[in-house]
Amino acid sequence: MNKIVATAAVRVTETDLADARLGPRFGRLDLASQLALVAVESFAASLEKLRRNRIGICLAVRAGSLSTDIEYWKGRNAPGGPSPTLFAYTLPSAAVGEIAIRHRLTGPNLCWIGNDKQLLPEAMGLILRNEADACIVIYSRVISTAAAELANLPKAAIACAALLERGGAGMEIPEDLSPDMDSFCAEVSGRISSL
């Protein structure tokens, strides 16, 4: 069965974090990981019916971990030096690890720095090549004020996430689709809510 469907999609912003209660570790995560976890949490119940070792994670981060890197670097002159807790989040793929830990996922994972144009095709490829039965797809744009000035990018704090699965009910995805994640998540959310 080569039909791939999107069964869930969501877009979260920093304001959605105020009500998040995801355990004692949540508060120490960087903003990008917090947003990604909250986004995936909205469809976590759907993960329960899938084999954990057959769920992939594909993440694209617009500016990598630049915002966290800047905060970490600022701590170099603080008493005790930079935060060892924050150091773990100076990797762009930190959110992948946090999602995998929280949901006990051991399938394949990929992380890109930059735009989201290859995100959906690559996630679909994991499923079509039978490397995964489902794939969590996340696009994160976390750009602090300091990072925005440094990289000449607009300030942002959002994450869009979708769950792609082989077969089943949901919005069928054509193989040639390569939209931006904001539009994709809005379309999937609208279609699924009308089913």
Image (spheres, rainbow, N blue to C red):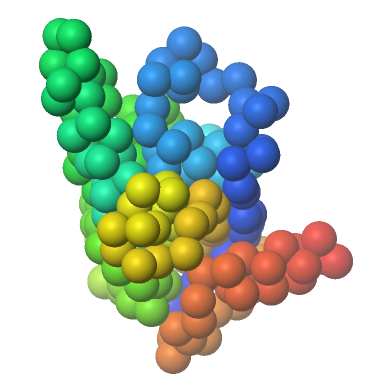
User: Within the image, what quadrant is residue 49 found in?
Assistant: top right
Where residue 172 sits in the image (x, y, percent)? 60, 77
Q: Is residue 12 above or below residue 174?
A: above
Q: Which residue of the protein is positioned furthest toward the bottom in this rendering?
A: 176
Can residue 49 be seen by looking at this rendering?
A: no
Front residue of 42/80: it is 80
142 vs 49: above or below:
below
> Which quadrant would the N terminus be assigned to in this image?
bottom left
Picture coordinates of residue 166, whole percent (x, y): 47, 65
Residue in the picture at 40% in, 66% down: 153
Q: How many marks?
A: 0
Q: Is residue 77 left or right of residue 188?
A: left
Q: Which quadrant is home to the C terminus?
A: bottom right
In this view, the residue in front, 56 or 74, is: 74
Query: Can residue 115 be seen at all in this image of the molecule?
Result: yes
**Residue 160 placement (x, y as % from top left):** 54, 57
Q: Which residue is found at the position 19% from the left and 28% from the top?
A: 87
Residue 122 spot, x, y in % from top left: 31, 72
The image shows residue 177, relative to residue 14, as above or below, that is below
